Amino acid sequence: MSHSSLMSIIKELLFLLPPALLALFLYTNLIKIRKRKKPNLPPGISGWPFLGETFSYLKPHPATSIGQFMEQHISRYGKIYRSSLFGEPTIVSADADLNRFILQNEGKYFECSYPRSIGGILGKWSMLVLVGEMHREMRMISLNFMSNVRLRSHLLPEVERHALLVLSSWRENSIFSAQEEAKKYTFNLMAKNIMSMDPGEPQTEKLRREYITFMKGVVSAPLNFPGTPYWKALKSRSTILGVIELKMDERFQKMSQGQEICEEDDLLGWALKQSNLSKEQILDLLLSLLFAGHETSSMALALTIFFLEDCPKAVQELQEEHLEIASRKKLKGESGLNWEDYKQMEFTQCVGSRNTTEETKLGMD
């Protein structure tokens, strides 16, 4: 074989070698992928691209039921199933034992997290979004603020005052929504304790209306287009943060001038004085606590009223317990609830515990 022929063959082999190596590489890795153990995921479907099953999941249903979405999926796939919600692959659990295990091992085997769309509304420094050391720091600020001493000396009198304000606003033989009244009551109570905002004031009412829009967007499909609930929620978030920032700037100005801050007993004053958080972090902290405290408390109140309607005997026992406490206080010449009065409300606390159990069942069963 001539030298030129040999060189020609070598050139052809070099030309064919890269595609051959590529084919071999792909074939080898394809075998590995096929042999790789598939994730042991529960049954279910992902639904539409990006949106998944979000719209079906968000379909309104009575608060005393788990909704048609959950019922259909549980009957088809069981209490633990796979889905796609708010743009994220999701495992949904309606199994009480598994949910209890997850809650008891949060921070150990599991990390609390929200879909990115919800995080975009609540803020990157929201206590509900953060994990790890920063979450613990935010949590400790909140817990230290809401100490047992403060619960007895500040929060309990505020709870009574706001409750009396709501009751005095009702007219005899008038019709009202227990759910809306519960939401108004809890919002005003949270606004007072977070930023010393009084109920009925124009700024408080404006903030409450914005908050309603904000909440509708938190539990909506993450479509950031003009006119959608999610888009409106982001606008309301900016407005709410603007109000909080204005309050914060007023405090900064007083502090720089050496003036005494009268509202130092609220969470805003506490965060400014007792923490090293940045302005952005404090804004997200206050917004997340307004969100978390309002939603859980208002739902608990509304469901308590709902369940009590079917139990007149419990209502009668509640009235008797409260009237007995009120009579004793009147004989002593006392007015206003205190911690000792609360400790004597044994049946009232039993009703509250029972309602919490019912709520938990609705979320787990």
Image (cartoon, rainbow, N blue to C red):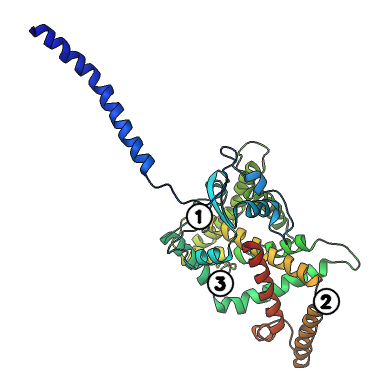
Per the model, the C-alpha gap separating discs 1 and 3 is 24 Å
Q: Residue at x 81, y 71 (%)?
A: 310
Horizontal relation, residue 4 to residue 243: left or right: left
Rendering coords of residue 73 (x, y %)? 63, 51
Query: Splitting the image into 4 quarters, where does residue 288 fall?
Result: bottom right
Horizontal relation, residue 185 to residue 13: left or right: right
Cβ–Cβ below 8 Å for labels 3 and 2?
A: no
Count neighbours of disc 1 (C-alpha within 10 A) and say few if under 14, some if 14 to 19, many if 20 or more: few
Between residue 321 and residue 255, name the one nearer to us: 321
Q: Name the kind of residue labelled 2 in the image.
A: Pro
Task: Give the residue pinned by disc 1.
Answer: 113
| Nearer the camera: disc 1 or disc 3 | 1
Image height of 352 relative to 246, above or below: below
Q: Name the kind of residue labelled 1 in the image.
A: Ser
Per the model, the C-alpha gap separating discs 3 and 2 is 35 Å
Task: Give the residue pinned by disc 3.
Answer: 146
